[in-house]
Image (spheres, helix red, strand yellow):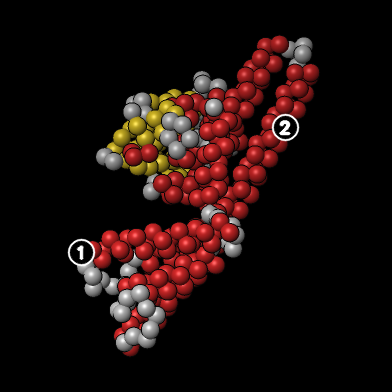
Amino acid sequence: MDDTTDTSGGWLTAFARRGLRPGSPAAISFAILCVAAATVLRLAIDVVATDAVPFATYFPAVLIAALVAGTAAGAVAALTGALTAWYMFVPPRFSLASVKLEDVVSLGLFFFAAFAIIWIADRYRALLRRLGEEEAYRKVVVEELGHRVKNKLATVYAILRHELRGHPDVWQSAAGRLRALSAADDFLVGGGGEAIPLKQIIDMELAPYGSASIVMRGEPLTLSGKLSSVLSLVVHELATNAAKYGALSVPNGSIHIDWAEDGDDIVLDWIERGGPQVVAPSKRSFGTNLIERSLGAFDGAARIEFARDGIICRMRFPRSGAGR
């Protein structure tokens, strides 16, 4: 049952992205079906308004045919739609005899608008194809990177287990931290689609460093969607920097993390204390840019302050990305 659902879901997703194969019999048949539906709708309108614009219902038929089935299908819809409307709804009806100048002008305007619609639809389909290819590429790269990270962690795990076989206490501590690193990577690669408590995100990223130097305070909140993954990246970068240069690099250093609601936003403060004296870098690093820009996609922001006692980072993001 699940396999059938997944297969149908994948087929529907692919159809929504790519539509019918341009120029195929199915695409041409779909275009004719669109014209038939437009004709039925125009006949229904004719019941209450016999002098309605003859070509009105054929514009959406051309658009739908071009979007779903490509340029050739759009052209077929435009041509067959024009002939059908001319024959059935332009006086004298059911005749292809010459008519008034204004009718010829209307037909010309219909063709102009129809082929403009087809061109726009073709550009839109091309854009969707490029986005689909880019998404597929990124998915492959993310999966490959995740696989490589797992392999490297497994190698490190095996080496440390062998080297520390005579020190079981040290090995247990190191093994726990490696497992915590692996869990955080799995969450990030997974995309963060499910709702997850804000505290759990922070715990995952800080677990490899132990809890003795970390103080957290805040009301229970959950994050969902991509925001949780992005916040995980930001916290990971802050924690890595703290372990290399900041409060987690010395025995007496500590990190205080507070979060609270502020109107329609969530405000999260990361405050390092007791670490080495902080000196603002001469140029912005990749990590600093990642921290300060990542939340922008969610109408959020992050600001880093290089205070004398340690790094201070204040993050703000919309409460709509969180729940109780």
At a point 51% along the width and 20% down the height, the residue shown is 212
Residue 234 picture location, percent across and down: 50, 40
Q: Which mark is residue 187?
A: none
Tell me the SS state at disc 2: helix
Observer-nearest of 193 and 19 = 19
Residue 195 picture location, percent across and down: 43, 30
Residue 30 picture location, percent across and down: 49, 58
Residue under numbered circle 2 = 152
**Callout 1 amino acid:** Val
**Callout 2 amino acid:** Lys
The answer to whether residue 101 is above or below residue 77 is below
Residue under numbered circle 1 = 48
Q: CA distance from mark 2 to mark 1?
A: 73 Å
Q: To which quarter of the image does residue 49 belong?
A: bottom left
The answer to whether residue 40 is above or below residue 247 is below
Label 2 environment density (alpha carbons within 10 Å; few <14, some 14–19, many ≥20): few
Residue 296 picture location, percent across and down: 43, 49
- Count of marks placed on residues: 2
Specify the quadrant that holds the C terminus.
Answer: top left
The answer to whether residue 171 is above or below residue 261 is above
At a point 61% along the width and 48% down the height, the residue shown is 136
At a point 39% along the width and 80% down the height, the residue shown is 96
The answer to whether residue 286 is above or below residue 95 is above
Tell me the SS state at disc 1: helix
Q: To which quarter of the image does residue 35 belong?
A: bottom left
